[in-house]
Image: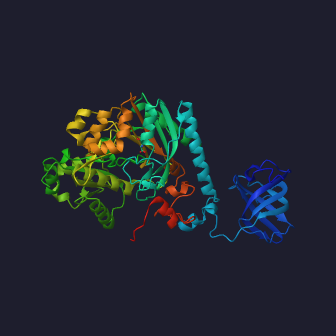
Amino acid sequence: MIFRTHMAADISGLVGESVSLAGWVARRRDHGGITFIDIRDASGIAQVVADGLATEDLRMEFCIRVMGTVRARPEGTINADLPTGTVEVAADSIEVLSPSDPLPFMLDDRVDADERTRLEYRYLDLRRPRMAANLRARSKAVSAIRRSLEGLGFLEIETPTLVRSTPEGARDVLVPSRLRPGSFYALPQSPQLFKQLLMIAGVERYFQIARCYRDEDFRADRQLEFTQLDLEGAYWGENEVQTTIEAAIAAVVQDLRGESPPLPFPRLTWQESMDRYGADKPDLRFGMEIVDLSSELTGTEFRGFAATLESNGVVRGINTGAREFPRSLADKLTEEAKALGAAGLVWMVIEPDSQLRSPVAKFLAAHEQKAIVEALAGQPGDVLLLVAGPWRTAVTVLGQLRLSLGRPEGHRDLAFVWVTDFPMFEETGDGNLTFSHHPFTSPQDVEVMRNRPLEAKARAYDVVVNGVELGSGSIRIHHPDLQRQVFDILGISAEEQESRFGWFLRALRYGTPPHGGFAFGIDRLVMVLQEEANIRQVIPFPKTQTGHDPMTMSPSPVDEGQLAELGIALVEE
Ligand code: ASP
């Protein structure tokens, strides 16, 4: 039996031909004895006209097969919004292949259903055209990545998902072992060490579409499990890794958007990115850059600024452009700045006569006011915001205010950027050091790292689009001694180095080629390209914010027998 001769979206040129379509009842309208049915299949929608056929029983999302003849729609009934809007199928027969229960929500892109219900009935939610388009985009993205990397001689290699914990900075998802009660596998936070082992094994160019697991707090762009393009190569440096990643991303953008982004992506060092945008994932779709005003204000009599400058702090500002600036907005932004750690926020409005209206205007000399306006390229009507404080606080607060005031509404534009030269380490609250990227990242300068670790820069780089971090990578350490030194600085004792990483340190001793790589989130890239604000929109079966799947009800308790086999006893909370 032939279910269908054509897909719904492909019938436009078939006027006069007999066709058989199969799909779902997406819509029905009754007009005095004639029923119009929109039939939806994986390709799209076609209109079916049932004249004189019994259609009373056909309800929404019934799965049907229609046989009939394609004809031009009568004048005045053409639907320009639909690719098949100039034709319809005059049905000879409509057969129900399987009926549907009444729907828990309307499968219409225009109707917003509660997300929990959508996840509980995800198989219905995915029938919506927008979700179906997201699934297609994902598939195209993965295929573009494969095509581009295979063209460059990469091998696609799978690495295990039951592994020993890899330190990427997040909590592990653990899996108990039945054969070794009391021992656990971790699910990989990334294939980091395995891909490095593949370099030692002689692979030279590796990639994988890898599922990774990180038990972190959920956010709009995070899930417990996610998919990365993971990649590694030997005998190459930062520039070659970055060019390869650009090629893969450009292939995806080309296939999803029909045009490639300009290459190469601009590059900013971490320091420049922090100084100019107050973030290590800058949104370059708009300017409103942060400007250093410290030299303009040296010697100022205004205590608020003078005290900061004397104690090695900075005064920085942004020009937020011409805008209404009621008191309520000033108060709201001041609150936001304080919540982010600033002692306060100084605002200035440039009046039509170029005078400054600001609570601090009377404390600033005329030449200081002029210098501030000039440094920020202020024009009458513009609102300037200034923050005085330690460098990091000042730039991050202004960076946040910049985003609150300037971030464009639409997601259509794409501004890719590389952020390079990240610090090697960061301070943890308790005075210890932790890695910024991961502990296998090579320092730029070993001497600086040994003597002044907080000043050391890493051979690490991120790719960012529209303020979203897509992924990170680095050139790796390929000498066991250097690797030990980094572990030492991180406060990992010699015993712990041996017990956790001894196997890896040993592997590094067998002629390890210099190597480096990268990984970026495929979910995040597709999310941005599909103009979705939430990563769950592009993951077929995601979890809720609390890590729950309302459809299969996972995670779930397991029976006592299973626990006993694993040697696990639960404690009452
Ligand atoms: N393993 C790293 C990550 O998942 C990426 C890399 O360094 O290649 O972020």
Q: Is residue 537 visible?
A: yes
Q: Is residue 386 above or below residue 449?
A: below
Residue 178 percent across, percent down from the top left: 48, 55
Residue 482 percent across, percent down from the top left: 29, 34
Q: Nearer the viewer, residue 39 or 85?
A: 39
Q: Is residue 73 above or below residue 485?
A: below
Residue shown at 82% from the left, 63% from the top: 95
Taking the image in four quarters, ligand 1 sits in the one at top left
Q: Is residue 440 visible?
A: no
- Residue 505: quadrant of the picture: top left
Residue shown at 35% from the left, 39% from the top: 441
Color theme of the render: rainbow
Quadrant of the image containing the C terminus: bottom left
How many numbered discs sit on the rendered protein? 0
Residue 14 percent across, percent down from the top left: 81, 48
Q: Nearer the viewer, residue 477 or 121?
A: 477
Q: Is residue 112 above or below residue 303?
A: below
Describe residue 472's horizontal placement relative to residue 349 as left or right: right
Q: Is residue 532 above or below residue 451?
A: below
Q: Nearer the viewer, residue 403 or 474?
A: 474
Residue 26 percent across, percent down from the top left: 71, 63
Describe residue 245's horizontal placement relative to residue 70 as left or right: left
Describe residue 161's horizontal placement relative to residue 425 as left or right: right
Q: Nearer the viewer, residue 64 or 190?
A: 190
